[in-house]
Image (tube, rainbow, N blue to C red):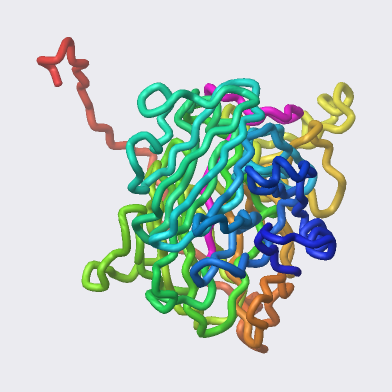
Amino acid sequence: MDTPKSTKNITRRDFFKLAGAGIALTAVNKVALAALPEIVTAEKANTQAPLHPDNGRPYNPVVTLNGWSLPWRMRNGVKEFHLVVEPVIREMAPGMKAHLWGYNGQSPGPTIEVVEGDRVRIFVTNRLPEKTSVHWHGQRVPNGMDGVSGLTQLAIPPGKTYVYEFEAKRAGTFMYHPHADEMTQMAMGLMGSWVTHPKNPKFMQVDRDFIFLLNAYDIEPGSYTPKTNTMLDFNLWTFNSRVFPGIDPLVVNKNHKVRIRVGNLTMTNHPIHLHGHEFQVTGTDGGWVPPSARWPEVTTDIAVGQMRAIEFVADELGDWAFHCHKSHHTMNAMGHDVPNMIGVKQHDLVKKVGDLLPDYMAMGETGMAEMSEMASMMEMPLPENTLPMMTGTGQYGAIDMGGMFTTLKVREGLAKNDYQDPGPYQHPKGSVAYEYVGEVPTVTRPPATDEQSAVEVQVRKPSGHSGH
């Protein structure tokens, strides 16, 4: 995979390299180029190679999960970026696309990477049908650059370009998102990541550095556009607007030090859990956590509006699950009113319902895992533009996951910039769980009795606050 380059002095050869990686330059005339940085957009939802700086201060770049970093140009010592706010089409996973709002062709928008002390200028062009703004979440900026429409600036009208300019004062992990019609615009996918690297590239240096955002959508099966007034009952919980099995794996070398930066712009908290390793929380959007304040974890809870950076040494080979530990957040397109059918015999109903609905399939009698098993064996009828609740297949069968789920793939001998999926882990002989074929002892239970003990409980409902 070719590494995207700075847009300064882009050649025809560079253009086709960028286009091959799913990144394209929008054609603008030479006069416009003199005033504005080129508009660079992404069309594919796969993880792009890190953007190594070819000018400005050196830094160790991050890799955006199912995303990319925005190129810049240097002009009179200022690092200039061009963000375009616009309607986009985002593939959530193969088989489903969503009509969202994003930046430069994708939602979330591209990651912006700068270095502590950089003077930064961001041109923001609004191609939405309504006004917008950009807030640089967690950063110290002049009040008039904080991006709260009505409070600190005039909102950016449709068709207009505004300029934000400030010094990146503090190293750390941040986000950007609108503070204009926020309920609608963030529900439509307007958000992106920002990393300010330390002046010293050796400070807290890691071998692989990943970043992504947690976001959620309510998109009815058969629909393409999110419901923007949903507050709690979302049906698609995503890493960077992707759901499993559409989320790329995190591919790392054995014994390498790994950092994963996660920001939460959903409406609830997420306990993010890593299998096979212990990690420490080393950073928040408030800054780096001193070593004396860290402790080992395998799960960290990320509240709404927070960023967390975790670090660990990837010293265990394998394909390790990495996911939100809220079980309904690792499912796709859930129907919240589906009854629990475990233990309900449906065989006598199948023929009757099948006469009316030829594609009807009785599901849930033994649990919901049979859905993914059936999907792997045959073509299941689904509404247009949606995904099964649980999907994905591994080398041992259906994975029974969706939503906020991916894998950490630890391998030996990866090249420096090799982030390609290496395929399933080949387990050493004798290291996989197996079936026991010996005799299983019977279960001894106490004899049943007809006598039932009962406890009388009297409940008094409070009347007014005095009863609390």
Residue drawn 69% across the image and 36% down it: 345
Tell me residue 93's x, y (percent).
72, 48
Q: Left of 113 or right of it: where is 95?
A: right
Q: Left of 101 or right of it: where is 453?
A: left
- Boundaries of the magenta span: 210-229
Residue drawn 27% across the image and 32% down it: 454
Establish if 22 lies above or below 223: below
Q: Main secondary structure of the magenta part?
A: loop
Tell me residue 252's x, y (percent).
59, 76
Establish if 111 lies above or below 154: below
Taking the image as drawn, is residue 340 in sight? no
Tell me residue 26's x, y (percent).
77, 44
Taking the image as drawn, is residue 170 in sight? yes
All told, the count of numbered labels is 0
326 drawn magenta: no
Residue drawn 42% across the image and 56% down it: 173
Q: Left of 284 or right of it: where is 421?
A: right
Point out the residue furthest to the top here: 463
Q: Quadrant of the N terminus?
A: bottom right
